[in-house]
Image (cartoon, helix red, strand yellow):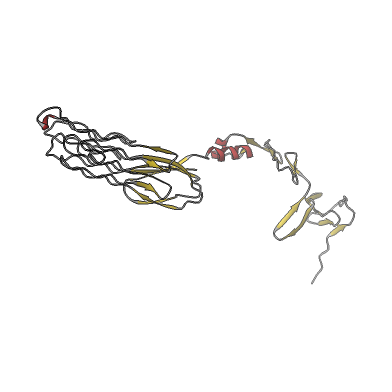
Amino acid sequence: MPVIKIKNSTNSGTQPGSLTNGELAVNIADSKVYVGQGGVTKIVDSLGRQDADSVSITGGSINNVPLNNSSGTVSTTNLTFGSNTVTAVDNDTTLATNSNSRLPSQNAVVGYINSKKGALKNIYTFTSNGTYTKSGDDVKQIRVVCIGAGGGGRGYAEAGGAGGMAEEVIDATSITTVSVTVGTGSGGGVYFGFSGQGGTTSFGSYLSASGGYGANQNHQHSGGHGGVGSNGNINIHGGGGSGHKNDHSQAYHNGSGHGGFSFFGGGNNGHHYSSRYAQNIQAFGAGGGGHNSYFQSGYDGMYGICVVYEYK
């Protein structure tokens, strides 16, 4: 095979005086390479040997910062490429621009990323049992609110209590899925007897909120007590239901009893004895209202809710 010879030198710092167009020359001592291009042009300047897909570069600078700078600092001033200057801008809005003369600096990129930390990504609501699934690895924290279900009401205006409330901020880095249980409201009934307690709402083993008690469940002729949250950063009792009313000798003249107020709002509103305008018009977790008449059933407690807020 023919041998192709390239001019070379073993004296560090020297370069060929002249080369014909396309002719190559190598300085073996300092690893510089030259080519003839209307004169002598240096095309490689101290490129070290390449091992295991890595290249060691020494010497030179970008924006007057040495390439082998051990401090790790990077200049944010303008960059010069030949005769062209690219402006390095400390403004994250330039990340969305499409300009050949503007370039976001390292400060701008870091600032843009930091501005997204803690941003709200998604909100999920559960009004029945289900499973929360984290939407991505960029979710770093979740805020969870649990509201228990309301207790049922009875006749003579005896009303159910509202479900409790629990709220917690949770580190989501190790979370993939969490089982969610949502409490159902207790049914209402006629005068005498008592209504049951609303169901508990929970987010896995992290936090939960118990349901409100039914009318007469805690004490005879009284409204139900409210439920309460547990294991949250904030735990709140639900509102209690109204108690027995006997303002007139005839039961049907009595006003209907208000169900206990939950964290999200109130229970059934009052109404005339012959109507049931307020049936199922309640906030999540509110207690069931008591009917004005002793022979009419009180209202059912409202089901609970679990709300999950995802943050980056």
Give the residue furthest to the left: 250
* Residue drawn at x 63%, y 40% as measured from the top left: 106
* Looking at the image, residue 41 lies above or below residue 98: below
Decide: is 126 above or below 78.
below
Q: Is residue 105 visible?
A: no
Judge left or right: residue 102 versus residue 26. left
Residue at 20% from the left image edge and 40% from the top image edge: 299
User: Height in image: 55 above or below 169?
Assistant: below
Q: Position of residue 87 (x, y in %)?
A: 64, 35
Q: Quadrant of residue 243?
A: top left
Question: Residue 117 placed where, x, y %?
Answer: 53, 40
Residue lying farthest to the top in this orientation: 247
Q: Identify the residue at the far front of this view.
A: 220
* Camera-side residue of 216 and 87: 216
Q: Is residue 200 visible?
A: yes
Left or right: where 97 falls relative to 58: left
| Foreground pick, 123 / 229 | 229
Residue 175: x and y in percent read: 47, 51
183 with respect to 86 (left or right): left
Q: Which residue, as the protein is rendered here, is positioned at the far bottom? A: 1
Q: Nearer the viewer, residue 168 or 124?
A: 168
In this rendering, position of residue 260 left or right of residue 137: left
Pick the quarter of the image with the N terminus.
bottom right
What residue is rendered at 37% in x and 50% in y? 180
Number of numbered discs overlaid on the protein picture: 0
